[in-house]
Image: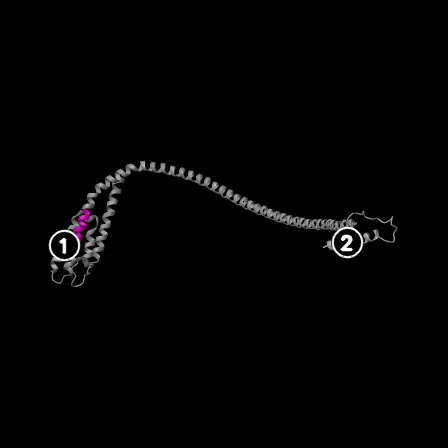
Amino acid sequence: MYFIPFLWLMVLLFTSRSVFMNDLNDPPNWNIRPNARADGGDGSRWNYALLVPMLGLAAFRWIWSRESQKEIEKEREEYRQRTAAFQRELEAKYHAVISESRRAVAHLSLELEKEQNRTASYREALISQGRKLVEEKKLLEQERAQVMQEKRQVQPLRSAYLSCLGQEEDWQRRARLLLKDVEGALSERQSIYCSLLLPRGKRLQLEKSLLGRAAADPIAADLHMAAGLTDIFKHDTHCGDVWNTDRRQNGRLMWLYLKYWELTVELKKFERVQKAILEK
Protein backbone atom coordinates (compact mmCIF):
# COMPACT_ATOMS: atom_id res chain seq x y z
CA MET A 1 0.00 0.00 0.00
CA TYR A 2 3.02 2.33 0.43
CA PHE A 3 4.61 1.27 -2.86
CA ILE A 4 2.71 3.49 -5.41
CA PRO A 5 3.19 6.87 -3.60
CA PHE A 6 6.81 6.03 -3.01
CA LEU A 7 7.28 5.12 -6.69
CA TRP A 8 5.82 8.45 -7.86
CA LEU A 9 8.07 10.26 -5.40
CA MET A 10 11.16 8.58 -6.83
CA VAL A 11 10.08 9.37 -10.41
CA LEU A 12 9.62 13.06 -9.59
CA LEU A 13 12.95 13.16 -7.76
CA PHE A 14 14.98 11.81 -10.68
CA THR A 15 13.08 13.90 -13.23
CA SER A 16 13.92 17.12 -11.36
CA ARG A 17 17.52 15.99 -10.98
CA SER A 18 17.84 15.54 -14.71
CA VAL A 19 16.44 19.04 -15.29
CA PHE A 20 18.88 20.68 -12.88
CA MET A 21 21.82 18.80 -14.26
CA ASN A 22 21.06 20.02 -17.81
CA ASP A 23 20.17 23.64 -17.08
CA LEU A 24 20.99 25.85 -20.15
CA ASN A 25 21.73 28.87 -17.98
CA ASP A 26 24.70 27.14 -16.37
CA PRO A 27 28.10 27.49 -17.95
CA PRO A 28 28.96 24.67 -20.23
CA ASN A 29 31.91 23.48 -18.21
CA TRP A 30 29.92 23.32 -15.05
CA ASN A 31 27.18 21.16 -16.46
CA ILE A 32 27.54 17.46 -15.97
CA ARG A 33 27.13 15.94 -19.35
CA PRO A 34 26.96 12.36 -20.34
CA ASN A 35 29.59 10.82 -22.45
CA ALA A 36 28.93 11.28 -26.13
CA ARG A 37 28.43 8.14 -28.04
CA ALA A 38 28.52 7.33 -31.64
CA ASP A 39 24.78 6.58 -31.65
CA GLY A 40 23.83 10.16 -30.76
CA GLY A 41 24.54 10.48 -26.96
CA ASP A 42 21.29 9.05 -25.49
CA GLY A 43 23.03 6.86 -22.80
CA SER A 44 21.90 8.98 -19.81
CA ARG A 45 18.26 8.39 -20.62
CA TRP A 46 18.73 4.63 -20.58
CA ASN A 47 20.70 4.85 -17.36
CA TYR A 48 17.91 6.74 -15.66
CA ALA A 49 15.33 4.43 -17.21
CA LEU A 50 17.07 1.39 -15.68
CA LEU A 51 17.70 3.04 -12.36
CA VAL A 52 14.05 3.84 -11.67
CA PRO A 53 12.81 0.22 -11.82
CA MET A 54 15.74 -0.89 -9.69
CA LEU A 55 14.93 1.70 -7.08
CA GLY A 56 11.27 0.75 -7.29
CA LEU A 57 12.20 -2.89 -6.85
CA ALA A 58 14.33 -1.99 -3.85
CA ALA A 59 11.49 0.05 -2.40
CA PHE A 60 9.08 -2.77 -3.07
CA ARG A 61 11.44 -5.22 -1.36
CA TRP A 62 11.82 -2.91 1.62
CA ILE A 63 8.06 -2.43 1.89
CA TRP A 64 7.43 -6.14 1.36
CA SER A 65 10.04 -7.00 3.98
CA ARG A 66 8.40 -4.52 6.37
CA GLU A 67 4.92 -5.93 5.67
CA SER A 68 6.26 -9.46 5.88
CA GLN A 69 7.86 -8.63 9.22
CA LYS A 70 4.53 -7.27 10.45
CA GLU A 71 2.74 -10.40 9.24
CA ILE A 72 5.39 -12.53 10.90
CA GLU A 73 5.01 -10.59 14.13
CA LYS A 74 1.24 -10.89 13.86
CA GLU A 75 1.43 -14.63 13.23
CA ARG A 76 3.99 -14.96 16.00
CA GLU A 77 1.71 -13.09 18.40
CA GLU A 78 -1.25 -15.24 17.38
CA TYR A 79 0.88 -18.35 17.74
CA ARG A 80 2.02 -17.14 21.14
CA GLN A 81 -1.58 -16.48 22.14
CA ARG A 82 -2.71 -19.87 20.84
CA THR A 83 0.22 -21.50 22.61
CA ALA A 84 -0.60 -19.67 25.81
CA ALA A 85 -4.29 -20.60 25.52
CA PHE A 86 -3.38 -24.19 24.76
CA GLN A 87 -0.99 -24.19 27.69
CA ARG A 88 -3.66 -22.75 29.95
CA GLU A 89 -6.09 -25.38 28.70
CA LEU A 90 -3.55 -28.11 29.33
CA GLU A 91 -2.85 -26.72 32.77
CA ALA A 92 -6.58 -26.57 33.51
CA LYS A 93 -6.98 -30.18 32.33
CA TYR A 94 -3.91 -31.16 34.32
CA HIS A 95 -5.28 -29.53 37.46
CA ALA A 96 -8.68 -31.13 36.80
CA VAL A 97 -7.05 -34.55 36.38
CA ILE A 98 -4.96 -33.97 39.51
CA SER A 99 -8.07 -32.91 41.45
CA GLU A 100 -10.03 -35.89 40.16
CA SER A 101 -7.11 -38.18 41.01
CA ARG A 102 -6.89 -36.70 44.48
CA ARG A 103 -10.62 -37.15 44.99
CA ALA A 104 -10.35 -40.73 43.73
CA VAL A 105 -7.37 -41.36 46.02
CA ALA A 106 -9.26 -39.83 48.96
CA HIS A 107 -12.34 -41.94 48.15
CA LEU A 108 -10.25 -45.08 47.80
CA SER A 109 -8.43 -44.26 51.03
CA LEU A 110 -11.77 -43.86 52.78
CA GLU A 111 -13.07 -47.12 51.31
CA LEU A 112 -9.82 -48.85 52.29
CA GLU A 113 -10.15 -47.53 55.81
CA LYS A 114 -13.74 -48.75 55.95
CA GLU A 115 -12.70 -52.17 54.66
CA GLN A 116 -9.88 -52.28 57.19
CA ASN A 117 -12.29 -51.37 59.98
CA ARG A 118 -14.78 -53.93 58.72
CA THR A 119 -12.05 -56.55 58.50
CA ALA A 120 -10.91 -55.67 62.01
CA SER A 121 -14.47 -55.96 63.30
CA TYR A 122 -14.87 -59.30 61.49
CA ARG A 123 -11.60 -60.49 62.97
CA GLU A 124 -12.69 -59.46 66.45
CA ALA A 125 -16.06 -61.12 65.92
CA LEU A 126 -14.37 -64.32 64.73
CA ILE A 127 -12.01 -64.27 67.70
CA SER A 128 -14.93 -63.71 70.06
CA GLN A 129 -16.93 -66.43 68.33
CA GLY A 130 -13.96 -68.76 68.54
CA ARG A 131 -13.60 -68.11 72.25
CA LYS A 132 -17.32 -68.65 72.71
CA LEU A 133 -17.13 -71.92 70.78
CA VAL A 134 -14.20 -73.06 72.91
CA GLU A 135 -16.15 -72.27 76.07
CA GLU A 136 -19.23 -74.04 74.70
CA LYS A 137 -17.07 -77.01 73.77
CA LYS A 138 -15.73 -77.15 77.31
CA LEU A 139 -19.27 -76.98 78.69
CA LEU A 140 -20.42 -79.69 76.29
CA GLU A 141 -17.50 -81.87 77.29
CA GLN A 142 -18.35 -81.34 80.94
CA GLU A 143 -22.02 -82.10 80.28
CA ARG A 144 -21.04 -85.16 78.26
CA ALA A 145 -18.83 -86.37 81.07
CA GLN A 146 -21.66 -85.76 83.53
CA VAL A 147 -24.13 -87.59 81.28
CA MET A 148 -21.75 -90.52 80.88
CA GLN A 149 -21.30 -90.66 84.65
CA GLU A 150 -25.07 -90.55 85.16
CA LYS A 151 -25.44 -93.18 82.45
CA ARG A 152 -23.04 -95.46 84.28
CA GLN A 153 -24.98 -94.85 87.46
CA VAL A 154 -28.34 -95.41 85.77
CA GLN A 155 -27.25 -98.46 83.81
CA PRO A 156 -28.07 -100.90 86.62
CA LEU A 157 -31.44 -99.21 87.14
CA ARG A 158 -32.11 -99.43 83.42
CA SER A 159 -31.31 -103.11 83.39
CA ALA A 160 -33.59 -103.63 86.35
CA TYR A 161 -36.33 -101.56 84.69
CA LEU A 162 -36.16 -103.58 81.48
CA SER A 163 -36.17 -106.80 83.45
CA CYS A 164 -39.23 -105.78 85.46
CA LEU A 165 -40.93 -104.46 82.34
CA GLY A 166 -40.43 -107.81 80.68
CA GLN A 167 -41.92 -109.56 83.67
CA GLU A 168 -44.96 -107.27 83.57
CA GLU A 169 -45.61 -107.97 79.90
CA ASP A 170 -47.47 -111.16 80.79
CA TRP A 171 -49.74 -109.33 83.27
CA GLN A 172 -50.44 -106.60 80.69
CA ARG A 173 -51.27 -109.22 78.04
CA ARG A 174 -53.78 -110.94 80.33
CA ALA A 175 -55.27 -107.54 81.26
CA ARG A 176 -55.79 -106.67 77.60
CA LEU A 177 -57.48 -110.02 76.94
CA LEU A 178 -59.76 -109.39 79.91
CA LEU A 179 -60.71 -105.93 78.59
CA LYS A 180 -61.40 -107.37 75.15
CA ASP A 181 -63.74 -110.02 76.61
CA VAL A 182 -65.51 -107.47 78.80
CA GLU A 183 -65.94 -105.15 75.81
CA GLY A 184 -67.59 -107.94 73.81
CA ALA A 185 -69.85 -108.93 76.71
CA LEU A 186 -70.90 -105.31 77.38
CA SER A 187 -71.63 -104.75 73.66
CA GLU A 188 -73.83 -107.85 73.62
CA ARG A 189 -75.56 -106.81 76.89
CA GLN A 190 -76.28 -103.31 75.50
CA SER A 191 -77.62 -104.78 72.25
CA ILE A 192 -80.00 -106.99 74.24
CA TYR A 193 -81.02 -103.97 76.34
CA CYS A 194 -81.79 -101.94 73.18
CA SER A 195 -83.56 -104.81 71.39
CA LEU A 196 -87.34 -105.09 71.54
CA LEU A 197 -87.32 -108.81 70.72
CA LEU A 198 -84.62 -110.37 72.91
CA PRO A 199 -85.70 -111.47 76.40
CA ARG A 200 -84.71 -109.40 79.47
CA GLY A 201 -83.63 -112.56 81.33
CA LYS A 202 -80.74 -113.12 78.94
CA ARG A 203 -79.45 -109.65 79.69
CA LEU A 204 -79.68 -110.21 83.45
CA GLN A 205 -77.85 -113.51 83.15
CA LEU A 206 -75.06 -111.82 81.15
CA GLU A 207 -74.77 -109.05 83.73
CA LYS A 208 -74.55 -111.61 86.53
CA SER A 209 -71.80 -113.48 84.66
CA LEU A 210 -69.80 -110.27 84.20
CA LEU A 211 -70.08 -109.33 87.87
CA GLY A 212 -68.98 -112.83 88.90
CA ARG A 213 -65.90 -112.69 86.66
CA ALA A 214 -65.01 -109.19 87.92
CA ALA A 215 -65.12 -110.48 91.48
CA ALA A 216 -63.09 -113.64 90.79
CA ASP A 217 -60.38 -112.31 88.43
CA PRO A 218 -57.43 -110.63 90.27
CA ILE A 219 -56.73 -108.32 87.35
CA ALA A 220 -60.37 -107.17 87.35
CA ALA A 221 -60.08 -106.66 91.09
CA ASP A 222 -56.99 -104.45 90.59
CA LEU A 223 -58.98 -102.37 88.08
CA HIS A 224 -62.01 -102.13 90.42
CA MET A 225 -64.10 -103.41 87.52
CA ALA A 226 -67.06 -104.61 89.62
CA ALA A 227 -68.04 -101.07 90.71
CA GLY A 228 -67.78 -99.81 87.13
CA LEU A 229 -69.95 -102.65 85.81
CA THR A 230 -72.62 -101.96 88.41
CA ASP A 231 -72.63 -98.28 87.42
CA ILE A 232 -72.95 -99.23 83.73
CA PHE A 233 -75.88 -101.62 84.38
CA LYS A 234 -77.74 -98.95 86.31
CA HIS A 235 -77.16 -95.83 84.26
CA ASP A 236 -76.15 -96.69 80.67
CA THR A 237 -79.48 -96.59 78.86
CA HIS A 238 -78.35 -95.10 75.57
CA CYS A 239 -79.42 -96.86 72.38
CA GLY A 240 -79.08 -96.12 68.69
CA ASP A 241 -82.03 -95.77 66.33
CA VAL A 242 -84.47 -98.57 65.71
CA TRP A 243 -82.78 -99.86 62.56
CA ASN A 244 -79.27 -99.66 63.99
CA THR A 245 -77.12 -102.76 63.44
CA ASP A 246 -73.77 -101.38 64.73
CA ARG A 247 -73.24 -102.39 68.35
CA ARG A 248 -70.83 -99.44 68.86
CA GLN A 249 -73.75 -97.05 68.40
CA ASN A 250 -75.36 -98.44 71.56
CA GLY A 251 -74.20 -97.27 74.97
CA ARG A 252 -72.11 -94.33 76.12
CA LEU A 253 -71.03 -94.88 79.69
CA MET A 254 -69.69 -98.35 78.93
CA TRP A 255 -67.25 -96.96 76.34
CA LEU A 256 -65.96 -94.38 78.82
CA TYR A 257 -65.33 -97.13 81.41
CA LEU A 258 -63.56 -99.30 78.82
CA LYS A 259 -61.23 -96.42 77.92
CA TYR A 260 -60.65 -95.73 81.59
CA TRP A 261 -59.76 -99.37 82.29
CA GLU A 262 -57.39 -99.43 79.31
CA LEU A 263 -55.50 -96.39 80.66
CA THR A 264 -55.53 -97.89 84.14
CA VAL A 265 -53.84 -101.04 82.77
CA GLU A 266 -50.98 -98.89 81.37
CA LEU A 267 -50.68 -96.99 84.64
CA LYS A 268 -50.71 -100.19 86.71
CA LYS A 269 -47.93 -101.62 84.58
CA PHE A 270 -45.55 -98.75 85.40
CA GLU A 271 -46.62 -98.69 89.04
CA ARG A 272 -45.82 -102.39 89.35
CA VAL A 273 -42.45 -101.87 87.61
CA GLN A 274 -41.63 -98.96 89.94
CA LYS A 275 -42.59 -101.00 92.97
CA ALA A 276 -40.42 -103.88 91.81
CA ILE A 277 -37.38 -101.62 91.25
CA LEU A 278 -37.75 -99.90 94.63
CA GLU A 279 -37.97 -103.26 96.41
CA LYS A 280 -34.61 -104.31 94.94
Q: CA distance from mark 2 to mark 1?
A: 177 Å
Residue at x-position 24% and y-position 49%: 264
Residue 82 on the magenta span? no
Q: Which mark is residue 219?
A: none
Q: Residues within 10 Å of mark 1 (few under 14, many from 20)?
A: few
Residue nearest the observer in this picture, 111 or 58? 58
Amino acid at circle 1: Lys
Please tell me whether mark 2 sits on a helix, a strand or a loop: helix
Rendering coords of residue 27 (x, y %): 88, 50
Rendering coords of residue 228 (x, y %): 21, 54
23 left or right, relative to 200: right
Give above or below for 271 relative to 251: above
Q: Which residues are magenta?
A: 174-185
Amino acid at circle 2: Val
Please tell me whether mark 1 sits on a helix, a strand or a loop: helix
Instruction: Check the picture and name the quadrant holding the C terminus.
Output: top left
Residue position marked by numbered label 2 in the rendering? 11
Residue nearest the observer in this picture, 34 or 199? 34
104 left or right, relative to 154: right
131 left or right, relative to 10: left
Residue 183 on the magenta span? yes
Q: Which mark is residue 208?
A: 1
Q: Quadrant of residue 204?
A: bottom left
Q: Residues within 10 Å of mark 2 (few under 14, many from 20)?
A: some
| Colour basis | one colour
99 left or right, relative to 259: right
Instruction: Check the picture and name the quadrant holding the N terminus.
Output: bottom right
Residue at x-position 77% and y-position 54%: 11
Question: Which SS does the magenta portion mostly show?
Answer: helix
Residue at x-position 24% and y-position 45%: 269
Which tag, 2 or 1, sits closer to the chain's start?
2
